[in-house]
Amino acid sequence: HSADNADTGSPEKLRELYEDIKKDGVQSVRYDWHWRNVEPVSGTWSNDHLERYKKAKEIMQEVGLEEPTVILSNPPAWAVELYKTDKEKFFDAYRAYAEQVRDALTQTDGPKIERVQVLNELNNRVYTPVEVEDLPRIFEITRDVFKTYNPEIKLMVSVIASNTIKLMGVPIE
């Protein structure tokens, strides 16, 4: 999560970090474009975060890492509340967020990303407060938004696989 903060997400720090992991044999990383950072208040976009996330991708390329996996993650509290009260407005807000990420990626140098991870740990209520039956809609929106950026975009997901599932998640069927 180095790109999240101004001090750890400076170009110098990111370059140092990515050069170091490249030397260790890492070929690619995944990193969050946290919804809560990109749109902390409904309709208000954080250009500071968008710029840091864009720069992180470019620095990864500069040091020779393969294209990253971008994670669309961590809805802000206002979006979680919206999901509980008006799912259609939540889906519209998610689309607007995904479009902001896509548009920011369009402005970066280098090859296009090939993978987008949809939310994080789909069966973990802490990270993904979306019901299983609504996940296909989220996937559809993500694919629709990113097809103009890269028609070959691949969607990924993650799930929690641990004994903490009783406290934080639901079983994946």
Image (cartoon, rainbow, N blue to C red):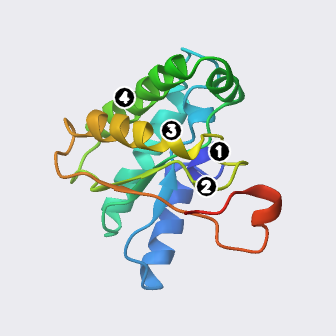
* x then y, percent, for residue 58: 35, 52
Q: Are marks 1 and 2 in contact (CB under 8 Å)?
A: yes
| Residue farthest to the right, as pictured | 167
Q: Are marks 3 and 2 in contact (CB under 8 Å)?
A: no
Q: Residue at x 48, y 85 (%)?
A: 24
Distance of mark 1 from mark 3, alpha carbons?
Answer: 31 Å
Type of amino acid under label 4? Glu
Question: Circle 1: is it few (<14), some (14-19), or many (20+) Cα within 10 Å?
Answer: few
Type of amino acid under label 3? Asp
Type of amino acid under label 1? Asn
Please report whichever mark, 4 or 3, sits nearer to the chain's N-terminal start.
4
Q: Nearer the viewer, residue 74 or 5?
A: 74
Please report whichever mark, 1 or 3, sits nearer to the chain's N-terminal start.
1
User: Where, quadrant-wise, is the C terminus in this rendering?
Assistant: bottom right
Distance of mark 2 from mark 4, alpha carbons?
Answer: 21 Å
Per the image, label 4 sits on a secondary structure element best described as helix
For the residues carrying marks 2 and 4, which lies nearer the camera in this image?
4
Q: Which residue is mark 3?
A: 134
Type of amino acid under label 2? His
Question: Circle 4: is it few (<14), some (14-19), or many (20+) Cα within 10 Å?
Answer: some
Q: Residue at x 46, y 61 (%)?
A: 30
Q: Which residue is mark 4?
A: 99
Q: Is 170 left, or right, of 90 in this rendering? A: right
- Toward which corner of the image does residue 167 lie, by quadrant? bottom right
For the residues carrying marks 1 and 4, which lies nearer the camera in this image?
4
Q: Residue at x 47, y 67 (%)?
A: 18
Q: Nearer the viewer, residue 70 or 106?
A: 70
Q: Which residue is mark 1?
A: 5
